[in-house]
Image (cartoon, helix red, strand yellow):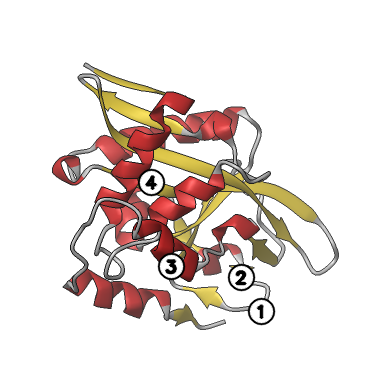
Amino acid sequence: MLTIRQETPADYQAVERLTRQAFYNVYMPGCVEHYLVHTMRHHADFMPELADVLVLDGQIIANIMYTKAQLTTPTGEVKRIVTFGPLSVAPAFQRQGYGKRLLTASFEKVQALGYPAIVIFGDPNNYVGRGFKSCHQFQVSLPDGKFPAAMLVKELVPGTLAGRSWHYLMSPVMAIDEAAAQAYDAQLPAMKKQWQPSQEAFKIMSQAYLEA
């Protein structure tokens, strides 16, 4: 039996453990995403109404969390949007469509709340099939004017970003203190930190920018 529901406080520990297992050694030796989960819920930008878990036969195997963000124009216009992350799927259940189901359900909730767009940082290979496009296509850049290759945009209201240039301002909660994250990880049951090729791929993508 598969269900998608909003997480409850009783789920917090399981969600954090799931996130750690899903991301450990993927982007770096170890990971910091579970620390983000640990701290995010206490931040004003966290959106508990969009924090969902996917439960299969009584076990949480995937989760998604959202925070508030905004887009601004040089003339001072502000558009309130959202970003998601972490999106976690337990290693044994990855590449089986569970993340897609969770995303589809969450997009419907975001749209029902009236948010016109979602901006994320992620591997385009994972998200273009979910309706995300390059930030450059929508003229959405960082405040310094750069267009990261990994910054992706999904319009929920077609044309909502057309005709203007935008700067993406993410929630401050996303600026993870890596030293604090490592200290927190050291308190948890030991997992082996090691290098793997996905870390080099992440390094390349995270340092890539599109021509303005």
**175 left or right of 161 in image:** left
In what quadrant of the picture does the N terminus appear?
A: top left
Q: Nearer the viewer, mark 1 or mark 4?
A: 4
**Mark 2 highlights which residue?**
141
Whether the residues at callouts 2 and 1 have beta carbons within 8 Å, the answer is yes
Mark 4 element type: strand
**Mark 3 highlights which residue?**
150
Between 16 and 119, the residue placed more toward the observer is 16
Which mark, by number, is residue 135? none
Amino acid marked by disc 4: Leu
- Of pointers 4 and 2, the one earlier in the residue sequence: 4
- Of pointers 1 and 3, the one earlier in the residue sequence: 1
Label 4: how many residues lie within 10 Å, few (<14), some (14-19) or many (20+)?
Answer: many
**Mark 1 highlights which residue?**
144
Q: Nearer the viewer, mark 2 or mark 1?
A: 1
Label 1: how many residues lie within 10 Å, few (<14), some (14-19) or many (20+)?
Answer: few
Q: What distance separates the C-alpha of mark 2 from that of mark 1? A: 8 Å
Q: Is residue 39 visible?
A: yes
Q: Is residue 155 visible?
A: no
Between 123 and 199, the residue placed more toward the observer is 199
Label 3: how many residues lie within 10 Å, few (<14), some (14-19) or many (20+)?
Answer: many
**Mark 4 highlights which residue?**
87
Mark 1 element type: loop
Residue drawn 22% across and 56% down?
190
Amino acid marked by disc 3: Ala
Label 2: how many residues lie within 10 Å, few (<14), some (14-19) or many (20+)?
Answer: many
Total tally of numbered discs in the picture: 4
Q: What distance separates the C-alpha of mark 3 from that of mark 4? A: 15 Å
Whether the residues at callouts 4 and 2 have beta carbons within 8 Å, the answer is no
Q: Nearer the viewer, mark 3 or mark 4?
A: 4
Mark 2 element type: strand
